[in-house]
Image (spheres, helix red, strand yellow):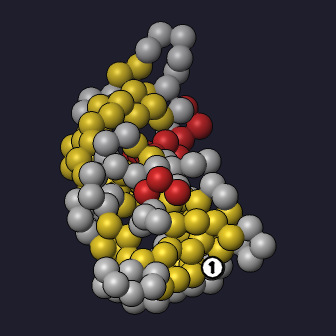
Amino acid sequence: MFTLRTFKMVVKIEPRLFGKNRNEAIATELNKKLANKVVINVGLCICLYDVTDIGVAHLIPGDGSAHLKVTFRYVVFCPFKEETIEGKVKLCDSEGIHVSLTFFDDIIIPPMHMQCPSKFNEAQSTWVWLYKVDPESEPVEMVVEKGFYEQDLNFHNYNQSFWIFQ
């Protein structure tokens, strides 16, 4: 679920930060640039773990800032393929089920990714999954509503992609 990813990036240190410790200035700029951002094919960036290499500072004429090529490791949230994650339902609406993982709230499970057959009950603002225990039995309803949280409610990441809606 949480991994360390290595990045290489040119970091711009403005002159107002020259009096600050170089490592602190780099960490501040990297966290401003990446923390709480989703990087395509990487995941949700959480925080800087460490800086492994700092290149020579270059000054660009007319800029005044120091530009450093930095190699660093960042803590990233990216569920592994087929990993099970537990979450709490924040909201149910016609767009889908909005799920919170406590540290991250922008997960939406759209209707097309729910178990079939599922339907939305507008009167109660709940999603209902109709499933059969065996072929001859009547369908059983499993209702998913706001606040629903159980060990049995799991989310599987089968295709290594997830949707983030802002």
The residue under label 1 is: 145
Residue 108, percent across and down? 54, 59
Query: Of 110 and 10, which appears nearest the observer?
Result: 110
Tell me the crowding category of disc 1: few under 14, some 14 to 19, or many 20 or more residues within 10 angstroms, Cα based: some
Task: Check the image and name the residue furthest to the top.
Answer: 61
Query: Of 111 and 89, which appears nearest the observer?
Result: 111
Can you say whether 143 is above or below 104 in the image? below
Query: Of 126 and 116, which appears nearest the observer?
Result: 116
Q: Secondary structure at mark 1?
A: loop
Is 1 displayed left or right of 126 in the figure?
left
Is 130 displayed left or right of 122 in the figure?
left
Q: Residue at x 40, y 43 (%)?
A: 39
Q: Residue at x 38, y 70 (%)?
A: 155
Residue 113, percent across and down? 43, 57
Tell me the quarter of the image containing the N terminus: bottom left
Can you say whether 138 is above or below 74 in the image? below
Query: Of 127 and 69, which appears nearest the observer?
Result: 127
